[in-house]
Image (cartoon, helix red, strand yellow):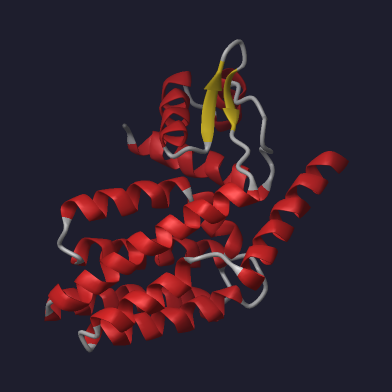
């Protein structure tokens, strides 16, 4: 896959996240190629990556379309994601070294910078890097692969969560607690904190459902 296809994947994913491309929308390679002024090959690669992440599916006679995931299914996926990340945090707290801890702190600082200016998109990427480092520092390659794979499937919805009012600052504060627990090698505390940070329930479930509903209603108006 090329760097161009990676960029196109991010652009199309952003359109899915914001509702510009609503669930059920057909992704026409020719139209997208014209829009981005590229050939169809990187567009095809980008759509293939999105399909691998579970955001797009191929249907008979329709080709690639944006997937619609129900709120109930999303909750189930976030439950599994929370358990995987909790395991990563527990192992990272046990195995992390001084240099790795420094890198995690630097990633946390990037989140702070984005949160301070309320830049949800910048925070999304900094947040993603922070979490990925925790996967990596678990020093369990199979666990890292599984967590990364599900994280890719949930990218759009994790991005949407960060657009909820006050979520950036709350997310950052939760990161601080996780970082402190990992630095102190408090395995169970790190696991519990990261699980609570990721899982979608209660008010956060309501916020996510409302955000999805707004996107669908705007699409209906259009």
**For residue 107, what is the image quadrant?**
bottom left
Residue at (27%, 62%) from the top-left corner?
135
Q: Quadrant of residue 144?
A: bottom left
Residue extending farthest right = 221
Question: Would residue 96 be seen by someone viewing this image from the given angle?
Answer: no
**Residue 152 pos. (x, y %):** 41, 48
In the rendered image of this protein, does residue 18 appear above or below residue 162?
Answer: above
Of residues 196 and 41, the one drawn nearer to the viewer in this rendering: 196
Q: Quadrant of the N terminus?
A: top left
Q: Could you say where residue 210 lies in the image, as x and y percent from the top left?
A: 73, 59
Q: Work out which residue is located at the far top of the displayed protein and give it.
A: 61
> Compared to 177, does 131 lie above or below?
above
> Position of 42 compared to 133: left or right?
right
Q: Is residue 73 visible?
A: yes
Q: Name the quarter where the C terminus is drawn.
A: top right
Q: Give the residue drawn at x 48%, y 62%.
A: 124
* Rendered view: 37 above or below 146: above
Q: Residue 207 location, x and y as percent?
A: 68, 65
The residue that appears at 52% across and 28% down in the rendered structure is 57
Residue at the image point whose x is 55% and y is 80% from the top? 169
Q: How many marks?
A: 0
Where is residue 185? Give x, y as percent: 20, 84
Q: Is residue 79 above or below residue 45?
A: below
222 sits left or right of 190 in the view: right
Q: Is residue 211 left or right of residue 155?
A: right
């Amino acid at each position: 896959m090329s760097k161009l296809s990676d960029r196109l994947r991010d652009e199309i994913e952003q359109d899915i996240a914001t509702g510009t491309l609503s669930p059920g929308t057909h992704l026409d390679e020719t139209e997208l190629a014209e829009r981005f002024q590229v050939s169809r090959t990187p567009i095809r690669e980008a759509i293939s990556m999105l399909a691998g992440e579970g955001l797009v599916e191929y249907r008979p006679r329709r080709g690639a379309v944006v997937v619609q995931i129900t709120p109930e299914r999303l909750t189930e996926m976030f439950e599994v994601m929370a358990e995987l990340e909790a395991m990563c945090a527990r192992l990272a707290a046990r195995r992390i070294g001084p240099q790795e801890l420094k890198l995690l702190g630097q990633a946390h600082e990037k989140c702070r910078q984005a949160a301070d200016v309320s830049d949800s998109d910048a925070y999304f990427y900094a947040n993603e890097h922070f979490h990925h480092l925790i996967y990596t520092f678990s020093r369990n390659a199979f666990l890292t692969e599984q967590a990364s794979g599900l994280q890719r499937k949930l990218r759009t919805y994790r991005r949407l969560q960060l657009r909820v009012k006050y979520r950036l600052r709350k997310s950052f504060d939760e990161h601080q607690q996780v970082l402190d627990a990992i630095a102190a090698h408090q395995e169970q505390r790190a696991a519990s904190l990261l699980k609570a940070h990721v899982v979608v329930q209660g008010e956060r479930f309501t916020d996510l459902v409302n955000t999805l509903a707004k996107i669908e209603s705007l699409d209906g108006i259009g």
